Image (spheres, grey):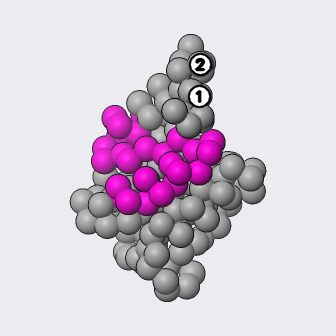
């Protein structure tokens, strides 16, 4: 069981599906952004979710915006976040294995419920390959 933040700048059937799916898997889910109160400001939502991860209030984040790109960029501005935009199970698996990603970002417009389930299954079943520790955590510093 993990503590997760699920955040989006738009509440959709996909965000509802993912939040319910994660709860059914036994995770404790904290909702942010338009999933609790409409504001649509993806930059602020991404930042707030990322800070929950870096503060230790949650273990990881699952973030959404229309393309997935904007909220991913916003989250990555927070030191200590390694957010990855994942469009299929393989990108999710590799983001965890090679990059120790702690936030997954998913496109609302390009992701089906079936694909989201496959992405999340790959994400949560993959462990970080410790051989990549030095390389992956270089991302925690500003170049």
Please provide percent x and percent y for residue 42. 45, 69
Between 78 and 55, which is closer to the camera in this rendering? 78
- Mark 1 neighbour density, 10 Å: few (under 14) some (14–19) many (20 or more): some
Please provide percent x and percent y for residue 99. 49, 30
Between 123 and 5, which is closer to the camera in this rendering? 5
Relative to 128, is 120 above or below?
below
Reply yes or no: does residue 29 show up in magenta. no
Reply yes or no: does residue 89 show up in magenta. yes
Relative to 79, is 12 above or below?
below
Between 29 and 86, which is closer to the camera in this rendering? 86
* Point 59% across, 19% down: residue: 134
* Point 62% across, 45% down: residue: 79
What is the number of callouts on the image? 2
- For the residues labelled 1 and 2, the Cα–Cα distance comes to 6 Å
Q: What is the secondary structure assignment of the residue under circle 2? A: helix
Residue 121 in view, yes or no:
no
Relative to 111, is 96 above or below?
above
Please provide percent x and percent y for residue 24. 57, 61
Q: Which residues are magenta?
A: 68-93
Question: Which residue reaches farthest bottom?
Answer: 38
Question: Which residue reaches farthest left?
Answer: 110
Q: What is the secondary structure assignment of the residue under circle 1? A: helix
- Mark 2 neighbour density, 10 Å: few (under 14) some (14–19) many (20 or more): few
Proximity of marks 1 and 2: CB atoms separated by less than 8 Å: yes
Residue 137 marker: 1
Question: Which residue reaches farthest right?
Answer: 56
Which quadrant would residue 81 be assigned to in this image? top right
Residue 134 marker: 2
Which quadrant would residue 49 be assigned to in this image? bottom right
């Amino acid at each position: 069981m993990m503590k997760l933040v699920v955040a989006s700048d738009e509440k959709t059937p996909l965000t509802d599906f993912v939040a319910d799916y994660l709860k059914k898997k036994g995770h404790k889910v904290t909702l942010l952004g338009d999933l609790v109160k409409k504001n649509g400001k993806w930059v602020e939502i991404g930042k707030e979710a990322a800070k929950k991860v870096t503060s230790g209030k949650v273990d990881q984040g699952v973030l959404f915006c229309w393309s997935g790109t904007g909220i991913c960029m916003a989250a990555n501005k927070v030191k200590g976040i390694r957010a990855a935009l994942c469009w299929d199970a393989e990108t999710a698996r590799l983001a965890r294995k090679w990059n120790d990603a702690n936030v997954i970002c998913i496109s609302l417009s390009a992701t089906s419920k079936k694909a989201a389930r496959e992405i999340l299954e790959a994400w949560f079943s993959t462990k970080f390959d410790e051989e990549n520790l030095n390389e992956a955590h270089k991302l925690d510093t500003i170049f």
